[in-house]
Image (tube, grey):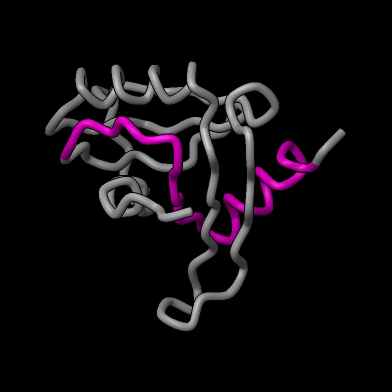
Amino acid sequence: MPWKITAAILFCALYGVDTQAAEIAFSSRQDFTAINLQLKNQHNPGAITLNVELSPAAQARLASASREALHQNLTLIIDGKKVSTPKVQAVLDTRQLQISLSRETTQDLLPSLLPR
């Protein structure tokens, strides 16, 4: 399943805080139909990558939020935790996302991603 390059670039971790940033929140239980965590990457050894497949409803919300925040910052929230605040370069109408995470964010987020 190919990952859209725009999605990978958009959600590269940019940890700056912008009080004017729009937000999009996802619930891993309801919005993600598949989750994979890549802990080791030969091209970027310190990066941890969260690969997710969005439900159709979550994909529509992402497309709408990215359209409204075009050329502005958009804070990505997963299970109530702020993950990143990248600048939106293009409208994202895709089901697959690659999200680069810091180790600290991964440790905070991991328990909520595990199946219950």
Image-based side of 21 in relation to 78, left or right: left
Give the vertical position of 82 relative to 105 (above or below). above
| Residue occupying image coordinates x 48% and y 83% | 42
Is 29 or 82 nearer to us in this picture? 29
Query: Looking at the image, which residue sits at the far bottom?
Result: 42
| Residue occupying image coordinates x 37% and y 25% | 62
Residue 105, magenta (yes or no): yes
Quadrant hosting residue 109: top right
Is 83 or 36 nearer to us in this picture? 36
| Residue occupying image coordinates x 50% and y 55% | 101
Query: Looking at the image, which residue sits at the far front?
Result: 1
| Residue occupying image coordinates x 50% and y 74% | 46
Image-based side of 105 in relation to 73, left or right: right
Q: Quadrant of the C terminus?
A: top right
Residue 65 image point, x, y percent: 30, 20
Total numbered labels placed on residues in the image: 0
Quadrant hosting residue 44: bottom left
Query: Looking at the image, which residue sits at the far right?
Result: 116
Query: Looking at the image, which residue sits at the far left?
Result: 71
Residue 37 image point, x, y percent: 63, 57
Give the vertical position of 2 relative to 58 (above or below). below
The magenta segment is 90-114
Is 79 or 66 nearer to us in this picture? 66
Residue 42, magenta (yes or no): no
Give the vertical position of 9 relative to 33 (above or below). below
